Amino acid sequence: IALYEGSKPEKNVTHIEIEPFTILGVCAGLIPFPHHNQSPRNTYQ
């Protein structure tokens, strides 16, 4: 798996990550966005 298109080796690469932070997974990719919360929680604030 290559993180960036320019960093792929000369061999055939079958997978390139869309964004580098998604290599950690979906949940870890959402950590920098804590303000993206469920609306019911925001309603009671």
Image (cartoon, rainbow, N blue to C red):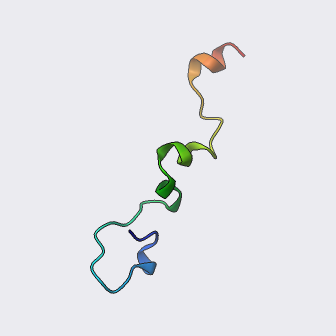
- Can you say whether 31 is above or below 14 in the image? above
* Residue in the image at 37% along x and 66% along y: 16
Please state if 29 lies on the left or on the right of 44 as rendered.
left
| Whole-percent x, y for residue 31 in the image | 61, 44
Image height check: is 12 above or below 37? below
Which residue, as the protein is rendered here, is positioned at the far right?
A: 45
Extreme residue in the top direction: 44
- Residue 11 in percent (x, y) is at 29, 83
Q: Tell me where residue 9 appears, x and y as whole percent.
A: 38, 83
Number of marks in picture: 0
Name the residue: 53% across, 57% down: 21
Q: Is residue 41 left or right of residue 12?
A: right
Q: Residue at x 47, y 45 (%)?
A: 26
Taking the image as shown, residue 31 lies to the left or right of residue 14, namely right
Residue occupying the far bottom of the picture: 10
Q: Quadrant of the N terminus?
A: bottom left
Instruction: Decide: is 45 above or below 19.
Output: above
Residue situated in front as seen by the camera: 19 or 9? 9
Residue drawn 33% across the image and 86% down it: 10
Work out which quarter of the rendered image holds the C terminus and state it.
Answer: top right
